[in-house]
């Protein structure tokens, strides 16, 4: 390197010489700036399957994947999580104030109340807030519990599901359907 550019290390190196070097230099390909948000982590190195795997949100939108995920949760003895999440989605769409009240009590009795038949894993503070909101329920009274359950599924159950045989075979079937 020193033989090719001896003037590089001396103060007499001029602007014309810099322009000439820049013309001869190979420019690297421009790369897209990685998404550094918290939602999708950036993994340095070669392409990774983790980037290509669907998020929980994507799985919940597709009927076939939702059914497979529900079956997976049943095998892990945590099906109440997806049932609670889906029930909350339906509850949020309730328009009638009268229906809102009895549906909220039903959800509380089935999922939130301590020792409920399908008790979800939320802390005592969330339970108390929901219990207080039952006097005058609104469509968003289960939001915090629903978010908590969603995060549990996203962090614990979903990664295991994406490694399961059920998901892999369903993924393989969906790929082969495109070739026919």
Image (spheres, helix red, strand yellow):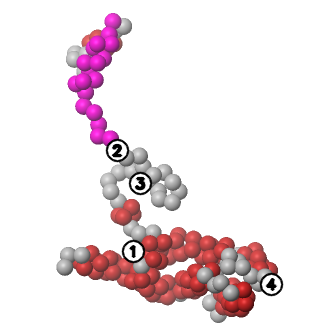
Residue designated by label 1 = 163
The magenta region covers 12-30
In percent of width and height, residue 75 lies at 47, 87
Q: Within 10 angstroms of label 1, few (less than 14), some, or many (20 or more) residues?
A: few
Horizontal arrangement in the rendering, residue 138 relative to residue 73 (left or right): right
Q: Are marks 3 and 2 in contact (CB under 8 Å)?
A: no
In the image, residue 149 above or below residue 114: above
- Ranked by sequence position, the earlier of labels 3 and 4 is 3
Circle 3 — which element? Answer: loop
In percent of width and height, residue 143 lies at 66, 74
What residue is at 68 percent from the left and 79 percent from the top? 139
Q: Are marks 2 and 1 in contact (CB under 8 Å)?
A: no
Camera-side mark, 3 or 4 = 4
Picture quadrant of residue 170: bottom left
Quadrant including the C terminus: bottom left
Horizontal arrangement in the rendering, residue 120 relative to residue 126 (left or right): left
What residue is at 47 percent from the left and 77 percent from the top? 60
């Amino acid at each position: 390197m020193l033989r090719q550019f001896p003037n590089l290390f001396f103060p007499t190196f001029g602007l014309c010489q810099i322009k000439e070097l820049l013309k001869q230099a190979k420019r690297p390909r421009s790369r897209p700036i990685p998404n550094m948000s918290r939602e999708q982590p950036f993994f340095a190195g070669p392409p990774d399957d983790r980037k290509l795997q669907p998020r929980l949100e994507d799985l919940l939108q597709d009927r076939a994947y939702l059914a497979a995920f529900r079956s997976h949760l049943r095998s892990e003895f945590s099906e109440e999580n997806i049932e609670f999440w889906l029930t909350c989605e339906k509850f949020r769409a309730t328009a009638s104030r009268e229906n809102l009240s009895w549906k909220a009590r039903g959800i509380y009795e089935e999922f939130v109340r301590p020792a409920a038949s399908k008790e979800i894993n939320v802390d005592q503070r969330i339970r108390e807030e929901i219990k207080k909101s039952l006097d005058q329920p609104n469509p968003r009274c289960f939001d915090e519990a629903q978010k908590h359950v969603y995060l549990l599924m996203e962090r614990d159950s979903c990664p295991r599901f994406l490694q399961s045989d059920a998901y892999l075979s369903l993924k393989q079937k969906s790929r082969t359907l495109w070739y026919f």
